Image (cartoon, rainbow, N blue to C red):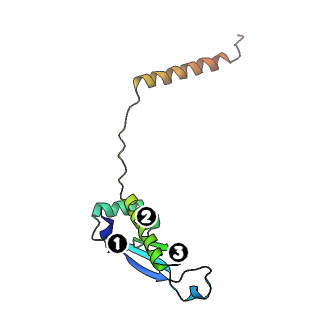
Amino acid sequence: MNTEKLIKELSFKAIRSSGPGGQHANKVSSKIELSFDINASKELSDDQKTLLLKKIANRLTKENILILFCDESRSQHKNKEIVINRFKKLITVGLIRPKTRKPTKPSKASIKKRLDNKKRASIKKSSRKKPDLD
């Protein structure tokens, strides 16, 4: 999966960042908002879209749009780099297919060991009982 092609489908918006910064913070929009519409993506296949929708469902809006923010740096360009790297990491992790579980049977030795342990525990507990005086 080439994430460089996906970056062209992203839309960015610069917003005024919150927090301290004095007079300069009121003039500069350094916070970056990244939005990515999964359903409208031309680079992702239908299988990849469904996998992403399932894996990152808690990070999506009702319209299946992924929105990421970054206001770590005072530089708009640095924030844009950071949020793009977060997006790349999220997409690459989201597109990893989980391994299918192959059901296996317990070995005969493990079954025998379990039954022997049960038998031993049963004998131990029955020996603790008070004897019947009938």
Q: Could you tell me which residue is drawn at 49 percent across and 83 percent down?
A: 15
Label 2 close to label 3 by CB (< 8 Å)? no
Tag nearer the camera, 1 or 3: 3
Residue 2: give x, y in percent of width and height: 30, 64
Label 1 close to label 3 by CB (< 8 Å)? no
- Label 1 sits on a secondary structure element that is helix
The amino acid type of the residue labelled 3 equals Ser
Q: Could you tell me which residue is drawn at 51 percent across and 19 percent down?
A: 116
Residue 55: give x, y in percent of width and height: 41, 59
For mark 1, what is the residue?
7
Tag nearer the camera, 2 or 3: 3
Give the CA separation, mark 2 to mark 1.
Answer: 20 Å
The amino acid type of the residue labelled 2 equals Ala
Q: Is residue 61 visible?
A: no
Pick whichever, 62 or 126, lies toward us: 62
The amino acid type of the residue labelled 1 equals Ile
Q: Could you tell me which residue is drawn at 64 percent across and 20 percent down?
A: 125
Q: Earlier in the sequence, mark 1 or mark 3?
A: 1
Disc 2: CA contacts within 10 A as few (<14), some (14-19) or many (>=20) = some
Q: Earlier in the sequence, mark 2 or mark 3?
A: 2
Q: Which mark is residue 73?
A: 3
Q: Is residue 18 found left or right of 58 in the rendered image?
A: right
Q: Is residue 84 visible?
A: yes
